[in-house]
Amino acid sequence: MTEHDVKDLSLSPAGRLRIEWAEHSMPVLRQIRERFDKEQPLRGVRIGACLHVTTETAMLMLTLKAGGAQVAVCASNPLSTQDDVAAALVQESDIPVYAQKGETRERYYGHIRAVLARRPQITMDDGADLVSALHGDQRNLLPGVIGGTEETTTGVIRLRAMAREGVLAYPIIAVNDANTKHLFDNRYGTGQSTIDGILRATNILLAGKTVVVAGYGMCGRGLAARAHGMGAHVIVTEVEPLRALEAVMDGYRVMPMSRAAEVGDLFVTVTGNRSVIGKAHFARMKDGAILANAGHFNVEIDLDSLGGMAQSRRIVRPYVEEYALPGGRRLFVLGEGRLINLAAAEGHPAAVMDMSFANQALSVEYLVRHGARLGKGVYPVPAEIDREIARLKLASMDIQVDELTPDQEAYLSSWTHGT
């Protein structure tokens, strides 16, 4: 059996059933896998992936392997791994997997090193931890890398910083920025799955609650809309004037976190930045306030400061930790401040990850064909890939759209038509 580090291989049958269930909702990736299987565009290419090891990721790995790639995968978050899915990938598909739910920080980075030990020619990242490790203590591997892909907003931010500083050593496609990714995955996927994780962890009623959403990017938009739809009173905090104005026009109250801290019942960070909720905010929060994070890294809630303020801490139910503060107030932190949709639930629905991972698969194919001609830097997903994925998704839903007539195309391409 292939090298691996998963929790329990006996979980494989359950994982296989979960992968099959996800497959029903991923018709675009199924079509790509069928073509890959025939054409073998990735034959012999070594791919190292650092992604959330879930059913949807399993479908992506199977698609890449069908295209002829040699794939190895580790987790991009210590709490996001579905152990039965990890077992199924090893046991039934002979894919090296290094991931266990709840793994320590040391084990997490050991798993990244295990993937890099396979000398990947293509990297796939969700948060840029694999790329960071590769550019840190594994620089000897850089000459063999053709290119990479990045799945999430936080990772793209980190990669663009590397490119600005001139340290990024190869081309990376920002999958997160594809329209068929961020307009759907970030908004509808994060919106729904974050609510799902919070409710699974707490079983609270959202109707009537005041929900504070920190950040009004695509993920924040989706979360605010879902919370509002379930009867919550939504407050948005922002640092960008345009996004704040959009939140106001969408019908939400907008205010600084210092004010929102006094009235919120549930706080969810979705910013990609650190210490969005900190010591001064904790001091203002009401007894029983709940804090969760839907950003990639567990830095958005300043848990060190909260821990320093607490007189005691205890786990009151799975993924819910109580911090008892002086004066009798209690604050509850969900999922250790990590991605709540993956810590306490199953992440995004497969139907929306279908488009995100279709972007990953087709971007890898593009890099294999064209990566050698690309310079070092962060690149958008080619527009033709974005359109093709939208076309395939619509076709799978049996939805047809209009086509421009030759006269309409001529009109749109001309400057001579006036009033």
Image (cartoon, rainbow, N blue to C red):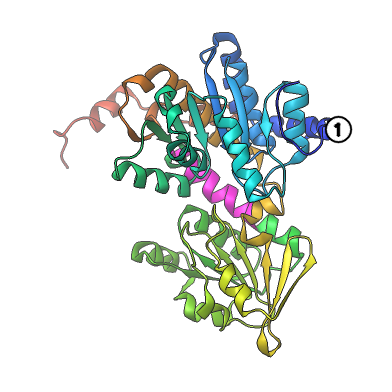
Q: Quadrant of residue 264?
A: bottom right
Does the magenta run of residues contain 343?
Answer: no
Query: Could you say where residue 354 lies in the image, as x and y percent from the top left?
Result: 59, 34
Amino acid on which disc 1 is placed: Ser
* Callout 1 crowding tier (Cα within 10 Å): few <14, some 14–19, many ≥20: few
* Main secondary-structure element of the magenta-colored stretch: helix
- The residue at 67%/50% (across/down) is 104
Whether 198 is drawn above or below 234: the answer is above
Residue reaching furthest to the bottom: 327
Query: Could you say where residue 338 lies in the image, as x and y percent from the top left?
Result: 62, 57
Q: Which residues are magenta?
A: 178-194
Query: Could you say where residue 131 lies in the image, as x and y percent from the top left?
Result: 47, 38
What kind of element bears circle 1?
Answer: helix
Residue reaching furthest to the top: 38
Query: Could you say where residue 178 lies in the image, as x and y percent from the top left?
Result: 44, 38
Whether 51 is drawn above or below 13: the answer is below
Q: Nearer the viewer, residue 23 or 71?
A: 71
- The residue at 57%/35% (across/down) is 113
Does the magenta run of residues contain 186?
Answer: yes
Query: Residue under circle 1?
Result: 10
Q: Nearer the viewer, residue 355 or 170?
A: 170
